[in-house]
Amino acid sequence: MIHWFKTSFANSTEENKFPRLPSSYTVELLTIHLWELAGKPLLFSLVQGMRAVLKLLVRYAEIEVVWHRHYHPKFPIFVKVKQKHTRPFILDPANPTVNVCDTCNAWDEVALVARHSLLKPLFSGVRAEPPWLFTDDW
């Protein structure tokens, strides 16, 4: 996924210096979350995993990732996020006061590039296979 980010977006230029893409840490946390949703498989198709991440990036406004096993659901930032309906939201498991998605202001661009990437030959005709069947609903 990191390679996809590095090769799928234009480098910052004087005219294009304001869009901020998600950090590699944000992408890593999203990838871990999807891997957990898939049941933490040790062996799986990387194409299936990448397809799952890209499909979720297309639907970025629905991203809400919190590792409640580490923090109580009534933690103030959770309540605040629920009230504001802040999306996308990925709580930093190392610092429960930070939404790692807040650093990005180009989610629409990320979704567009993810949508175009899913149309490329690598993903052409690829259907979800176990354990990634939950992505068929996306």
Image (tube, rainbow, N blue to C red):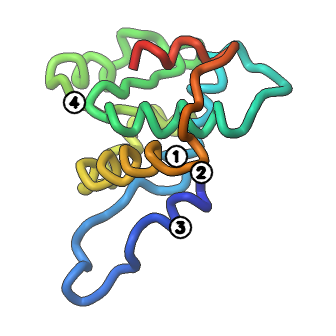
Residues under numbered marks 1 and 2 in contact, where contact means CB atoms less than 8 Å apart: yes
Residue 74 disc label:
none
Residue 53 appearing in the image: yes
Tell me where residue 97 sits by quadrant.
top left
Residue at the image position 72 percent from the left and 38 percent from the top:
46
Instruction: Kindly report which numbered mark, 1 or 3, lies closer to the viewer in this rendering.
Output: 3
- Label 4, on which residue? 86
- Label 3, on which residue? 6
- Label 1, on which residue? 27
Nearest to N terminus: mark 4 or mark 3: 3
Classify 10 Å Cα crowding around label 1: few (below 14), some (14-19), many (20 and above): some
Classify 10 Å Cα crowding around label 2: few (below 14), some (14-19), many (20 and above): some
Nearest to N terminus: mark 1 or mark 4: 1
Instruction: Kindly report which numbered mark, 4 or 3, lies closer to the viewer in this rendering.
Output: 3
Nearest to N terminus: mark 1 or mark 3: 3
In this picture, is 61 found above or below 54?
above
Secondary structure under tag 1 reads: helix
Residue at the image position 26 percent from the left and 16 percent from the top:
79
Marks 4 and 3 sit apart, C-alpha to C-alpha, by: 26 Å
Residue at the image position 38 percent from the left and 50 percent from the top:
116
Secondary structure under tag 4 reads: loop
Q: Residue furthest right?
A: 43
Instruction: Kindly report which numbered mark, 2 or 4, lies closer to the viewer in this rendering.
Output: 2
Marks 1 and 2 sit apart, C-alpha to C-alpha, by: 7 Å
Marks 3 and 2 sit apart, C-alpha to C-alpha, by: 9 Å
Residues under numbered marks 1 and 4 in contact, where contact means CB atoms less than 8 Å apart: no
- Label 2, on which residue? 1
Residues under numbered marks 1 and 3 in contact, where contact means CB atoms less than 8 Å apart: no
Q: Amino acid at mark 4?
A: Thr
